Image (spheres, helix red, strand yellow):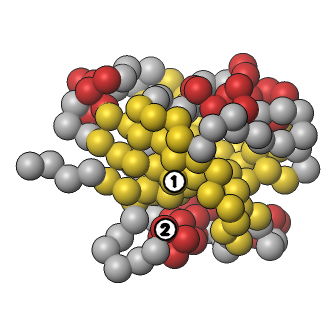
Amino acid sequence: MRSIRIAARALIIHRNKLLTIKMRDKSGVFYILPGGGQRHGETLREGLRRECMEEIGTQVEVGELLYVREYIGKNHEFRKTHHAFHQVENVFRCHLPAPENIGPGSEVDKKQVGIEWIPLPEIQARRFLPEVIKSFFTNEGFEPNTNYLGDVN
């Protein structure tokens, strides 16, 4: 029996820009929120703080839980490589005590090629995953219309 991976991600908006992890795969550049898998013995908030140190090199203040998203790989575009992958993502609104401290983290993801602040009005034009949350962004922030997105990419 395969296990379900539990993850936490940070939604960070500063000066009307979204902090993203810039990724590259065979199909090109795409963007995701910082964060990753929870380790045994740590809370979601602890895991998210650790993941942000690893990926963006700075401390985050973890705020409210915004939404939960599932990702069952066999149902989506990356089914060939993710056919046995199932993740439950918990996305928190986060803040940076010192935004100027962002930089290379201590342990970046395999496909991570950088960190990028995307102006909120430009998100619609970017390859941003999960695609479904793009509609929740406004020019001033992020307002999800539900707290459970289901199995989406």
Question: Residue 28: x, y in percent?
Answer: 50, 24
> How far from the left and from the top, in percent, is residue 104?
61, 62
At x 77% / y 67%, what residue is drawn? Answer: 96
Viewed as shown, does residue 29 lie left or right of 117?
left
Position of 104 relative to 85 (above/below): below
Q: Residue furthest bottom?
A: 41
Q: Does residue 106 show up?
A: no
Q: Is 45 left or right of 2, judged from the image as shown?
A: right
Residue shown at the point (31%, 23%) measured from the top left? 75
Mark on residue 90? 1
Relative image position of residue 139 (x, y in whole percent): 89, 33
In the rendered structure, which amino acid carries the disc numbered 2? Leu
Graded by Cα atoms within 10 Å as few (under 14), some (14 to 19) or many (20 or more), the crowding at tag 2 reads many
Query: CA–CA distance between discs 1 and 2?
Result: 8 Å
Where's residue 127, x and y in %?
A: 60, 25
Element type where label 2 sits in the image = helix
Task: Name the N-terminal-most of marks 1 and 2.
Answer: 2
Three-letter residue code for mark 1: Asn
Residues 2 and 100: in front is 2
